[in-house]
Image (tube, helix red, strand yellow):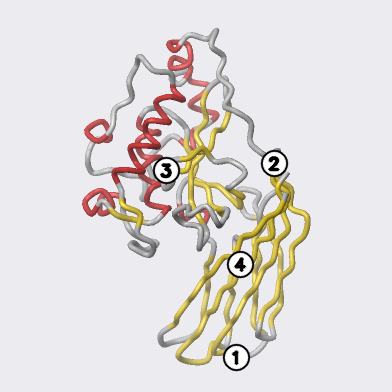
Amino acid sequence: MFNYTIKYTAENTYENPVFEAYWQYLVTPLTDDTQELISSEFNASASCVFEKSINGYDFETIRIRNKKAVDALNFEAVFKVIKAEVGPIEFDSSIKFEETYNALSDLSFTVDFEAYLYPTEFTQLKEEPFDLFMFEPSKNIIDNLKALNSWVHHYITFKSNETYQNTLLKDVVKNKAGDSPDFAHLFLAIARKNKLPGRFVTGYLHQGNNFFGDTQMHAWVEVYVPNSGWIGFDPSNNLFANHNHVKVAHGIDYKDCAPFKSFLFASGDKKIKHAVEVTYDQ
């Protein structure tokens, strides 16, 4: 077992006073079969009201509302999480490749996973995905996904803050550079084109192993494979998601999982800085 301490900080500064605002943070680690949230602590520099709510995907959000005009808001969250080692991927060798691939075309399968099967604004490719990467029918689905993970990892050069929240996939493919959400979006575009449900995941990455994306909130993907379930892939680092990955939320793309959103009644420029510290012991 791994005992994680995660510290998330955000500095928001504004050119002019903000008289009324709502800041929303989707940064709280969830509890599932591989991890357990033990404690959470929140602090803000300004005189604010904290509210917890559950979003449409059943993940906890923190909303902050100011009581008086402010020109800055510093927010800090500290989490304690216990994370388990993820076991090896289970694949029933008695099931023929054809049976698994045929399951993807079953109507009930399409209905069950409809939300994660179709392109979105950020997973829409101008090119045909098959022109970029093709699955090999002679390989099982998991081996094809491992190959896709490796291909995306090498196709895009990781550059932190290279892109913005509204960067489209066609620009990422053209420039062959991006941040972890761009790796995830490209992976999802190709997986979904091959009839595999895929969801965008945000969370924290263990620091100290020189992983790409470990200094900020990280993005990876989960793909549903018949007879195996949801499997996590981190194309930024060419890894399976394991104990190194502490999950916060998932959705169809970045918009569903954006760590920070704000609704302001103010004018002028603003500056936002985010930082993450992740430590653990066994």
> Spatial distance from mark 4 to mark 1, Cα to Cα?
24 Å
Q: Amino acid at mark 3?
A: Pro
Q: Amino acid at mark 1?
A: Ala
Residue 168 vertical position relative to residue 189 in the rendered view, above or below? below
Q: Amino acid at mark 2?
A: Ala
> Tag 3, which secondary structure?
loop
> Spatial distance from mark 3 to mark 1, Cα to Cα?
43 Å
Query: Residue 148 in the image: x percent, y percent?
Result: 37, 33
> Spatial distance from mark 4 to mark 3, Cα to Cα?
23 Å
**N-term-proximal mark, 4 vs 3:** 4
- Do residues under tags 4 and 2 come within 8 Å of each other at their CB atoms? no
Instruction: Report the side of 129 relative to 8 (left or right).
Output: left
Q: Residue sitting at 55 percent across and 7 percent down?
A: 94
- Do residues under tags 4 and 1 come within 8 Å of each other at their CB atoms? no
Return the residue at label 1: 69
**Residue at the farthest right position:** 38
Return the residue at label 3: 235
Return the residue at label 2: 84
> Tag 4, which secondary structure?
strand
Query: Residue 164 in the image: x percent, y percent?
Result: 36, 63
Which one is nearer the viewer's eye here, 94 or 49?
A: 94
Q: Which mark is residue 8?
A: 4
Query: Residue 200 in the image: x percent, y percent?
Result: 49, 46
Categorize mark 1 by other alpha carbons within 10 Å: few (<14), some (14-19), many (20+). some
Q: Residue sitting at 37 percent across and 30 percent down?
A: 147
> Tag 1, which secondary structure?
loop
Categorize mark 2 by other alpha carbons within 10 Å: few (<14), some (14-19), many (20+). some
Residue 190 vertical position relative to residue 137 in the rendered view, above or below? below
**Closer to the camera: disc 4 or disc 1?**
4
Please identify the quarter of the rendering in which residue 270 is found. bottom left
> Spatial distance from mark 4 to mark 2, Cα to Cα?
21 Å
